[in-house]
Amino acid sequence: MQELNRSIILNMIREYGPISRSDIAKRKQISPTTVASAVKELIQAGLVCEDGAGASNGGRKPIMLRISPENRFLIGVSVTNYTITVAEINLEANIRKTHTVDVAADPAHGEQIVQLLLDSIAAFIAQIPYMDRCIGISISVPGIVDNYRGIVYYNSKLNWHNVALKDIIENSFQLKTWIENDMNAMVLAEKKFGQYSKFRNLLYVHAGGGIGAGIVVNDEILRGARGGAGEFGHTSVDRNGIRCECGNVGCLETCVNWDAVRAKLQAAAASDRSSALWSLTNGKLADIRPSDFSAALNVGDPAAMTVMNETLEYLGAGIVNMVNLFNPDVVILGGKLLYGNDVMIDSIKSYVRERALQFSIQSMEVHPSSLGDNAELIGAASILLQDVFRFSLT
Ligand SMILES: [Zn+2]
């Protein structure tokens, strides 16, 4: 009970601070003595500080309280199928510093990647002289995750099967650890730290190294029975397609992840010497980056336009299906294939507007991610922060 009160009060200060002790007591109908003792603990824990005197309403001026976001911090970790990024993040989900290592493209053993993760965290925290102020480690990972038990059940690219990641990290660093699926973490972050907090039904679509979705229905993350909901990339779109790592053939991901799109761009530009992609990559088509694709689309490059339209046929159709299934208030588009690629985002918008059930989308909005390149890390941070501050999604 005491801990619950503390969390409620902490979240109150986070949301409404600067706020006085008596205002907290009034708003939450908690006794002033309970508020006073909880606030004392929060100040001792370095989470809250006093912030001068507020306006008086007759009597003595009240002392105001606010969160002290710089006093404490967390270690946020974003694991993708290509990289591991470790970061120091403050209590308002602002990133202070980061370090990234590449994950070998073809991991023979998932265990090696777990070791790489441990080594990366160890090296990062060895550089921080004030680790006593760290409140925990928060990790976002792709794959099917049991966030409660902290187990990664399955990730085909990292070759992880039933990895008890929370226990492994906690045993190694003696710091409380949180684990969440990357898409769930990002949709949570869009709602709590991005621009889309007013929506109750969110569909976050991520197109990058993989394709995925994070779904919030009536202010709750949709997880499914075992955490496997939202595996948008493994929806079947081509029964004659290539084999996917999941064992199926013709998954959406095999058609439109960044590697597939880059290969198509290379092929299209290779047979079109006038393509802008040649100059954008200084003649090295193997080095095409997402920003080159976006720049080529901005100048209406025919090779890039052809690849975009082909990508749209798969990805756009997939998003239409998701919109018709979940009827979201907002669709948020992120990942390196989409973020910063205005032409592609506009094309998806029109595609969905034309093809989704018209009644369902009358008030639906489609926007780019509001977290940008840091979406994964802010996602990671929001898992821990949501738990520590106990903020509800509403
Ligand atoms: Zn698949």
Image (cartoon, rainbow, N blue to C red):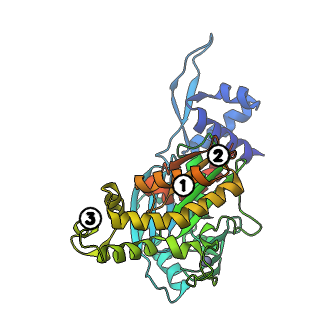
Q: Considering only order in the chain, which callout, 2 or 3, is on the residue closer to the N terminus? A: 3
When the figure is inspected, residue 265 is found, relative to residue 363, above or below; the finding is: below
- Give coordinates of residue 90: x percent, y percent: 48, 50
Q: Residues within 10 Å of mark 3 (few under 14, many from 20)?
A: many
When the figure is inspected, residue 344 is found, relative to residue 6, above or below; the finding is: below
- The residue indicated by pointer 1 is 351
Secondary-structure class at tag 2: loop
- The residue indicated by pointer 2 is 361
Disc 2 residue type (three-letter): Ile
Mark 1, mark 2: which one is toward the viewer?
1
Task: Identify the residue at image location x=65%, y=60%.
Answer: 321
Name the quadrant containing residue 158: bottom right
Q: CA distance from mark 1 to mark 2?
A: 12 Å
Which quarter is ligand 1 in?
bottom right
Residue lying at the far bottom of the rendered structure: 108
- Give coordinates of residue 92: x percent, y percent: 51, 46
- Give coordinates of residue 297: x percent, y percent: 35, 58
| Marking on residue 276 | 3
Disc 3 residue type (three-letter): Ala
Q: Considering only order in the chain, which callout, 2 or 1, is on the residue closer to the N terminus? A: 1
Name the quadrant containing residue 26: top right
